[in-house]
Image: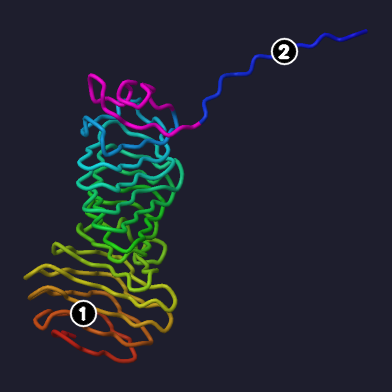
């Protein structure tokens, strides 16, 4: 007996797309189709581009709380993105100048933020959700002013400055691979217990941790990877920056203490340990105050004053 053929209707599927903002709608909302090229609003996990010629540079994510997006690329200048909390499965990158990002974020996978020009300000509260938060700056400053929480690590990279200026409580490591990690808040480096698991480790050649604004960092272990020099800078005219926690260089690596501003004081309240040199550099009227134990092959003072 001949069997008849049957046909099934395939479910509708949406291929993940890259959606380009044009801002030609009657409002500045993301759910308005007319604000996107082709008059098609994004769907879950789409990638977004904010181009040079986009209108309504100040615009709002009015999708439901927790809506998921992939990557976002800000090519144009002067964008100010805000709105409801979103889940981020990619990265947010700024190639333009004077851009800002202000909506709360939960990481859906390892992702983060990057900047290549001027200052990109991210004021978002960020829940790492157990994922690694990658912060990269290849030009200008990536300025993180929102609170970072969760169990993931914060990892910096790039040839320029990443600045942490928020009241952060994340419990993972801070891994410094950027040229400079600027520390601008007493709790910028998250929760700490003077152990490597929650401490700060310099992983990049010539990377440095730079204390600014008269901060006091408490109970934070600072270390460097094997054969990686440890640079700790302190800036601010007539200011004292304080580090309370042990400082340990990678095997065979030197430690550099560098008050870089006039009359700046770098106060160190933990043990300092290396089997190499400790170098004191910076300005002629800067001071490095070492209040804990110092274990080193030799202490060399090139500039400024050391108080033991």
- Residue at image mark 2: 7
* Quadrant of residue 294 within the rendered picture: bottom left
* Quadrant of residue 281 within the rendered picture: bottom left
Q: Camera-side residue: 78 or 91?
A: 78
- Do the CB atoms of the residues marked 1 and 2 lie less than 8 Å apart? no
Judge left or right: residue 251 versus residue 30: right
Q: Camera-side residue: 47 or 232?
A: 47
Between discs 1 and 2, the one toward the N terminus: 2
- Residue at image mark 1: 291
Residue for point 25% across, 39% down: 102
Residue 25 part of the magenta-drawn span: yes
Give the vertical position of 128 relative to 13 (above or below): below
Residue for point 21% across, 77% down: 258
Viewer-nearest of discs 1 and 2: 2
Where residue 107 appears, as percent x and y from the top left, is: 40, 42
Which element type, helix, strand or loop, lies under badge 1?
loop
Quadrant housing the C terminus? bottom left
Where residue 84 appears, as percent x and y from the top left, is: 30, 31
How far apart in space, not on screen, are marks 1 and 2 (Cα)?
80 Å
Q: Residue furthest right?
A: 1
Tell me the magenta residue range.
Answer: 16-43
Where residue 19 appears, as percent x and y from the top left, is: 39, 31
Question: How many neighbours does mark 2 have within 10 angstroms: few (below 14), some (14-19), or many (20 or more)?
Answer: few
Residue for point 41% across, 84% down: 252
* Quadrant of residue 2 within the rendered picture: top right
Give the vertical position of 251 relative to 96 (above or below): below
Judge left or right: residue 8 versus residue 173: right
Which element type, helix, strand or loop, lies under badge 2?
loop
Name the dominant secondary structure of the magenta segment.
Answer: loop
């Amino acid at each position: 007996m001949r069997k008849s053929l049957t046909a099934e209707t395939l479910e509708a599927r949406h291929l993940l797309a890259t959606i380009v903002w044009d801002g030609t709608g009657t409002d500045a909302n993301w759910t308005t189709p007319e604000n996107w090229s082709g008059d098609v609003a994004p769907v879950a996990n789409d990638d977004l581009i904010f181009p040079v010629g986009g209108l309504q540079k100040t615009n709002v994510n009015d999708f439901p709380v927790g809506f998921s997006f992939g990557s976002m690329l800000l090519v144009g200048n002067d964008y100010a993105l805000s709105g409801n909390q979103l889940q981020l499965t990619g990265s947010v990158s700024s190639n333009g100048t004077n851009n800002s990002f202000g909506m709360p974020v939960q990481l859906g996978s390892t992702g983060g933020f990057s900047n290549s020009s001027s200052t990109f300000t991210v004021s978002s509260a960020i829940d790492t959700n157990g994922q690694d938060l990658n912060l990269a700056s290849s030009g200008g400053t990536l300025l993180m002013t929102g609170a970072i929480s969760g169990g993931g690590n914060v990892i910096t990279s790039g040839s320029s400055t990443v600045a942490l200026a928020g009241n952060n409580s994340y419990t993972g490591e801070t891994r410094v691979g950027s040229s400079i990690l600027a520390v601008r808040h007493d709790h910028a480096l998250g929760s700490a217990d003077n152990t490597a698991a929650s401490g700060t480790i310099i992983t990049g050649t010539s990377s440095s941790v730079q204390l600014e604004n008269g901060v006091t960092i408490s109970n934070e272990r600072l270390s460097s990877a094997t054969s990686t020099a440890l640079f700790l800078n302190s800036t601010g005219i007539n200011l004292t920056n304080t580090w309370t926690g042990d400082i340990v260089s990678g095997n065979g690596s030197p430690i550099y203490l560098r008050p870089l501003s006039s009359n700046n004081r770098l106060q160190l309240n933990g043990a300092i340990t290396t089997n190499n040199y400790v170098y004191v550099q910076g300005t002629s009227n800067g001071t490095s105050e070492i209040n804990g134990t110092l274990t080193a092959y030799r202490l060399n003072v090139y500039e400024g004053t050391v108080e033991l």
